[in-house]
Image: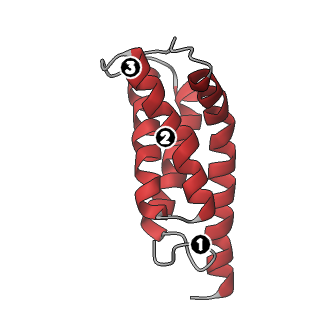
Amino acid sequence: MTATYHLGLLLMRLGFSGLMLTHGIPKFIQLINGNFDFGDPIGIGPTASLILAVVGEFVCPILVILGIKTRISAIPIIITMIIAAFVVHAADPLGRKELALLYLIGFLVIALMGGGRFALSRNT
């Protein structure tokens, strides 16, 4: 593969994960502050939903940025975006679902392509 291919993978990882952190950091802060007031879109309770959202929007994007088990790390993000687009925003117009769908597509590409040469764990 060419250097531009691997640079493209790096830019995908950094761009999508960095932007995802803007959603995950507030949830992480909410969690560590002990505020478990959160929605329950899949019926597992607000605390469990918040923890899973923090994993999907904070922990895993950091792993993707670093390129640690990139393909596996992208899976919880993909699941989180599926829930956001098709459960949380199910009744909303496409404009409200659009961001979750864009993240979903981006992380699907990352999961399929892996981390590339500039990842900490190669062939991931």
Residue that protrudes farthest toward the bottom in the picture: 1
- Which of the two marks, 1 or 3, is nearer to us in this view? 1
Eyeballing the image, is 85 above or below 42?
A: below
Secondary structure, mark 2, is helix
Mark 2 Cα shell of 10 Å, populated few (<14), some (14-19), many (≥20): many
Mark 1 Cα shell of 10 Å, populated few (<14), some (14-19), many (≥20): many
Which quarter of the figure is the C terminus placed in?
A: bottom left
Residue that protrudes farthest toward the left in the picture: 43
Seen at 49% across and 46% down, the residue is 104
Looking at this view, is 84 or 48 the one in front?
48
Seen at 46% across and 15% down, the residue is 39
Residue occupied by mark 3: 41
Kind of residue sitting beneath label 1: Ala
Which quarter of the figure is the N terminus placed in?
A: bottom right
Mark 3 Cα shell of 10 Å, populated few (<14), some (14-19), many (≥20): some
Does residue 90 appear in the picture of this structure? Answer: no
Kind of residue sitting beneath label 2: Gly
Kind of residue sitting beneath label 3: Pro
The percent position of residue 69, horizontal first and vertical second, equals 46, 64
Image quarter of residue 90: top left
Residue occupied by mark 2: 56
Eyeballing the image, is 85 above or below 38?
A: below
Seen at 30% across and 17% down, the residue is 43
- Which of the two marks, 3 or 2, is nearer to us in this view? 2
The percent position of residue 9, horizontal first and vertical second, equals 61, 69
Q: CA distance from mark 1 to mark 3?
A: 33 Å
